[in-house]
Amino acid sequence: MSVVKSPLSEADLKTVGDALKGALVDLVDLALVAKQVHWNVVGPRFRSVHLQLDEVVDTARQHSDTVAERSSAIGVTPDGRASTVAAQSAIGSVPDGWIKDVDAVRTLVDALGAVIGRMRERIDATEKPDPVSQDILIGLTADLEKHAWMFQAESV
Ligand SMILES: [Fe+2]
């Protein structure tokens, strides 16, 4: 049963719903991973990396809410439960304990790269079925790619 009447056809709804559900999972996990590293980073570049990580958290949290609410608006229930995120995230697990600043930067380059790759697939998949959802995915991917640029610039 769907409480919200969708503006999309059944077939398009499946495609777009899957894209938004996947985007939500990746963004929730990105916020968790960035916070984990924010708390555990050590090394000479502690301060800049520590602060930069919270900018990633802000981006991920803000966009996760937009994505989830877009999902609801088209009649697909968002699923941001921890078990769902753990099972479906694109991001590999972060080791427990302190993490050196260089490893923290590399972790974020990898995490952002994995998420961006899947976001770009979702942008392709939603182009025809729902340009409104695609627009949200494009906007958030631009922000993620900006973060990815900055972490890559620090990893040389
Ligand atoms: Fe903090």
Image (tube, helix red, strand yellow):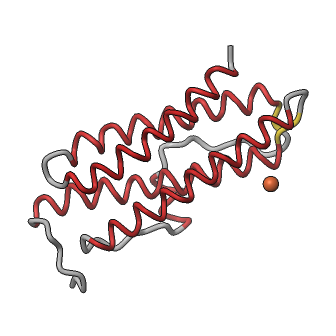
Please name the residue shown 48% across and 66% down the image: 80
Relative horizontal placement of residue 139, taking residue 155 as reference (left or right): left
Please name the residue shown 48% across and 65% down the image: 65
Residue 47 falls in image quadrant:
top right
Of the 4 image quadrants, the one containing the N terminus is bottom left
Is 97 located above or below residue 106 in the figure? below
For the residue pair 14 and 86, the one nearer the viewer reads as 14
For the residue pair 87 and 75, the one nearer the viewer reads as 75
Relative horizontal placement of residue 75, taking residue 110 as reference (left or right): left
| Spot occupied by residue 84 in the image (x, y as percentages of width and height) | 47, 63
Is 95 located above or below residue 79 in the figure? above
Relative horizontal placement of residue 69, taking residue 153 as reference (left or right): left
Of the 4 image quadrants, the one containing the C terminus is top right
For the residue pair 39 and 148, the one nearer the viewer reads as 148
- The quadrant of the picture showing ligand 1 is bottom right
Residue 149 falls in image quadrant:
top right
| Spot occupied by residue 46 in the image (x, y as percentages of width and height) | 86, 35
Q: State the residue lying farthest toward the top.
A: 156
Please name the residue shown 83% across and 31% down the image: 100
Residue 20 falls in image quadrant:
bottom left
| Spot occupied by residue 52 in the image (x, y as percentages of width and height) | 72, 40
Relative horizontal placement of residue 65, taking residue 54 as reference (left or right): left
| Spot occupied by residue 67 in the image (x, y as percentages of width and height) | 40, 60
Is 55 located above or below residue 20 in the figure? above
Number of numbered discs overlaid on the protein picture: 0
